Image (cartoon, rainbow, N blue to C red):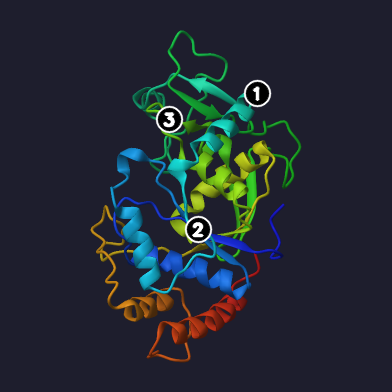
């Protein structure tokens, strides 16, 4: 069951793999506006759990840039790298309940098992090789069991398939994903000892009492996995809203990997106005003189924009 607006708590969770860029700004603005429009709290969480990709000093630069753009968290920022004990505790609970199991498969072995199979995308669907034991392989990772797909002789119906995870997105509308056929059992603790994003974000959202998640649509595909993990851990499912991602001239998602330029903290209003346009916000003041003036106008525009969206 999704959370209600009462006691709204939202968050912006950047990864410190480099400075903030325009795509990050769109997500930050949307999450901040939604929190303010609901009269709720807005938190910042630095998702630095992937040690090899974390750039020294990037987190501090991100926090300084957010402040320059008028985004001030209502509570002190959190760092995932300081919360690993919470992830270990969650994994131990899942082990005790039988929801997870050790896996000895390499990425190449998983890829080889799917040669010739029809693939909807580039995601490798885990075939369940180690579900019933390691078969002599050393344990490399820990995987979460997803529900088994319904068989052909089961009764039809909207909820007949236990592997079909459904949720309503406040921007994108009703969503569903078949975890058994589209994902397979997924990793929570990687072979290199790094905690997987899916586990960290679910544990953090629950521990920080996040009621609403506003983020880019590139993370929409992860949501069903997070909903299932929330169910396994017995924690609430937040309300989700995924805004359209920013793309470059080649149609690729704007990111550090595709050459996104760092935000110019000396000219915040220009970038904020562009971010508001990307979100489809109709501002009354096309040339605000201050950040405060922009914020008041943008909060009102956000409320009107949400009213135009189809009901989730």
Which of discs 2 and 1 lies nearer the camera? The answer is 2
**Real-space CA distance between mark 1 and mark 3, rounded to the nearest whole angstrom:** 19 Å
Is residue 108 positioned above or below 245 on the image? above
Q: Which residue is mark 2?
A: 76
Residue 20 point in image, percent of width and height: 33, 61
Is 108 placed left or right of 240 in the picture?
left
Residue 282 point in image, percent of width and height: 48, 85
Looking at the image, tell me whether mark 2 or mark 1 is earlier in sequence order.
2
Q: Marks 1 and 3: CB-CB under 8 Å? A: no
Is residue 287 positioned above or below 65 on the image? below
Q: Which residue is mark 3?
A: 190
Q: Mark 3 falls on what kind of element?
A: loop
Give 230 or 85, whichever is nearer the viewer. Answer: 85
Is residue 291 positioned above or below 264 on the image? below
Q: Mark 2 falls on what kind of element?
A: loop
Residue 155 point in image, percent of width and height: 76, 37
Q: Which mark is residue 96?
A: 1
Looking at the image, tell me whether mark 1 or mark 3 is earlier in sequence order.
1
Is 207 placed left or right of 57 in the picture?
right
Q: Quadrant of residue 98?
A: top right
Residue 190 point in image, percent of width and height: 43, 30
Looking at the image, tell me whether mark 2 or mark 3 is earlier in sequence order.
2
Residue drawn 38% across the image and 77% down it: 272
Residue drawn 42% across the image and 34% down it: 124
Is 304 placed left or right of 59 in the picture?
right
């Amino acid at each position: 069951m999704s959370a209600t607006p009462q006691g709204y708590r939202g968050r912006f969770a950047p990864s410190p793999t480099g400075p903030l860029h325009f795509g990050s700004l769109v997500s930050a603005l949307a999450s901040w506006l939604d929190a303010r429009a609901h009269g709720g709290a807005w938190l910042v969480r630095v998702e630095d759990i992937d040690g090899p990709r974390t750039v020294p000093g990037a987190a501090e630069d991100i926090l300084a840039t957010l402040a320059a753009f008028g985004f001030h968290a209502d509570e002190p920022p959190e760092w995932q790298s300081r919360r690993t004990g919470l992830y270990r505790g969650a994994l131990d609970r899942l082990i005790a309940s039988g929801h997870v199991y050790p896996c000895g498969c390499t990425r190449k072995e998983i890829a080889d098992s799917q040669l010739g199979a029809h693939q909807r995308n580039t995601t490798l669907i885990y075939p369940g090789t180690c579900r019933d034991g390691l078969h002599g392989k050393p344990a490399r990772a820990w995987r979460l069991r997803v529900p088994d797909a319904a068989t052909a002789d089961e009764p039809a119906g909207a909820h007949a398939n236990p592997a079909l995870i459904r949720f309503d997105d406040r921007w994108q509308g009703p969503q569903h994903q078949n975890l058994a056929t589209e994902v397979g059992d997924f990793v929570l603790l990687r072979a290199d000892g790094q905690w997987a994003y899916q586990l960290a974000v679910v544990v953090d959202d629950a521990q920080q009492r996040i009621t609403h998640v506003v983020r880019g649509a590139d993370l929409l595909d992860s949501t069903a996995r997070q909903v299932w993990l929330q169910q396994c851990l017995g924690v609430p499912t937040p309300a989700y809203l995924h805004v359209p991602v920013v793309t470059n001239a080649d149609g690729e998602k704007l990111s550090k990997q595709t050459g996104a330029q760092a935000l110019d903290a000396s000219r915040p209003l220009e970038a904020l106005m562009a971010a508001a346009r990307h979100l489809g916000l109709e501002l009354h003041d096309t040339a605000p003189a201050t950040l405060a003036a922009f914020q008041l106008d943008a909060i009102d525009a956000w409320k009107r924009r949400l009213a135009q969206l189809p009901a989730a």
